[in-house]
Image (cartoon, grey):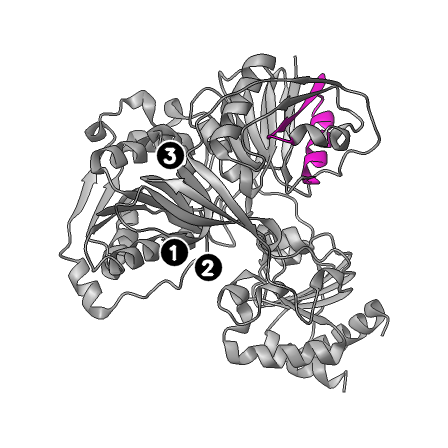
Amino acid sequence: MSDILVIAEHRQGELRPVSLELIAAAKEAGASSVTVALIGANAADLTGAVSVEGVDEIVTVPTASANFQPDEWKAAVEALIAARSPSLVMLPHSVDSWGFAPALGATGNYGFATDVFGIANEGGEWVVTRAMYKEKVHAEIDFPGKSTVVVTVRGGTWKPAEGSSSPAVSSLDASATANSSHVEFIEPPATGDVDITQAEFMLSIGRGIAEEDNVEQFSELADAVGATLGCSRPIADSGWLPKSRQVGQSGKVVAACKLYLALGISGSVQHQAGMKHVDNIIAVNTDPEASIFSIARYGIVGDIFEIADELVTHFE
Amino acid sequence: MKILVAIKQVANLDDDFEIRDDGKDVDHDFCDYEINEWDDYSLETALQIRENNGDEGEIVVVTVGPDDAEDELRKCLGKGADRAIRVWDDAIEGSDQVAIARILTKVVEKEAPDMVFMGVQAADNAYAQTGVAVAQQLGWPHAAVVNALEYTPGASTATANRELEGGLEEKITVNCPAVMTIQLGINEPRYASLRGIKQAAGKPLDEISHSDLGLSDDEVGEAGSVSRVRKVFVPEKGQAELIEGTPAEQAARLAEILKELSGA
């Protein structure tokens, strides 16, 4: 049997789209049935949002908290596993999953792997693929002797499931003592002069700019070429550009972008989460092995300052 | 007041490397090592809490790793940690994060700190597991991906901000003692002073094995793990079309491409 349980993720009353990617991944992995779990005080409200093609069953687990709470979510998933005995449980590799999925793994009761982007079933045993050594190597992982395997799945790997279905809906109880409690969500500061999610042409800078004093040069270059200036995490963490300009998992996804010029950005997974969908990525980096070159259409192995000095002359 | 900070020495793989004969890992001769970037922020969090506590309290750093990992512990001692513990022996080789967490859990139980800080993830393999796995095995409260923290030693709760996707944050209160995984950017990690580096050489650094912690052989290594690397391989990667030439020639071609693709 390869029954797969997908743990849907939601926040502020909305389904997080990665949940639909997991449903598609479950189908592709050859699930004999797909059960989607909706955990949370009001999560049953999302039943319609997860009734997409490929879903056989929805189980709601009403918990005390409306928002994610790790102890409640862990207890809910344990109750779901006990009730349905899935061979595979899929969660998104997301901040909330980081907050509770390892607790499931640490019970020792299940196989466990994180940030998985390949899933195969070989003769009834799950084999998953993840990256190691800053993505330079991929690893196949198996789980000897485990009848249930829990994995967190990298977002953006599968296309979201679409269409509609009429799954059976039931409810399951799970009780837990919460050791932490939600106070409030804090929205990111207003974007001010810029909303990079709307920009079609981005020029983004990373660690390669080396010093705060160099930001000005690239800001002027962005103006000259007609691009919106963005950055990778280290630049925002250093306070050299506001957080609203940060592209990536903890920053913004540049949803409308069609052309992305990455200067001095190595291309971490977290940065790629915000931009790898862009059709035309061009990268300039001194390191020929930088992972940004594996997703770029065009690349220049070189010094961003030399290239910037020359490039600006073509836009004067 | 005692804070325990668990760190990891992470591997940087050379551009040219070989896979080990058994196919289950790279040949470590092709790696060089450094402290995990996240751990600088965890240690700094602990150091600042002590400073705000009238410099009262002990900070203990711990790692699970071979001899080389001592270098990173010394760096932490140089920045102001008081004491270090390194756990290693041959049986630990091949441990996954759950088995590593089991070892760290024993250290925490022995040290009984008021708070445990660990990085959100390690830069090399990015499992993002160990901190919350330790909390589970301890039965302690936990918070993951913390990018702001208000904590007074001895208090029964702490207030933490979790960094969520897309710039959103969640403020939570957490019962203490707790395990927190610390995110980049929570503070500005200090550099070790010359005086600190000199003092570090004289600070205690204990080396212990899994059996010193009361763990049996089948609780560590592959036997104590819930996952197993079957093989590693070099992925096929996309490759950008490289623009060659002098910087002037490269920039000229880049300008053409930008003008064409941006419709300018």
CA separation in Å, label 3 and label 2: 23 Å
Label 3 and label 2 in one chain? yes
Q: How many marks?
A: 3
Q: Please tell me which residue lies in front, A305 or A189.
A: A189
The chain holding disc 3 is B
Residue B41, numbered circle: 1
| Amino acid residing under circle 1 | Tyr
| Amino acid residing under circle 2 | Gly
The chain holding disc 2 is B
Provide residue A134's location: percent of width, then percent of height. 52, 49
Which mark is first along the chain, 1 or 3? 1
Q: Which residue is mark 3?
A: B135
Q: Please tell me which residue lies in front, A124 or A301.
A: A124
Residue B185, numbered circle: 2
Q: Residues within 10 Å of mark 3 (few under 14, many from 20)?
A: many
Q: Is residue A196 left or right of residue B152?
A: right
Q: Please tell me which residue lies in front, A42 or B217.
A: A42
Q: Secondary structure at mark 2?
A: loop
Q: Give the quarter of the figure containing the C terminus of chain A.
A: bottom right
Provide residue B112's location: percent of width, then percent of height. 23, 37
CA separation in Å, label 3 and label 1: 19 Å
Give me the residue at 61% from left, 71% from top.
A302
Q: Is residue B18 left or right of residue A203?
A: left
Provide residue B15's location: percent of width, then percent of height. 52, 54
Q: Residues within 10 Å of mark 1 (few under 14, many from 20)?
A: many
Label 3 and label 1 in one chain? yes
Task: Check whether the beta carbons of the residues at disc 1 and disc 2 lie within 8 A of each other.
Answer: yes
Q: Secondary structure at mark 1?
A: helix
Provide residue A295's location: percent of width, then percent of height. 68, 54
Q: Is residue A167 above or below residue B97?
A: above
Numbered range of the magenta stretch: A15-42
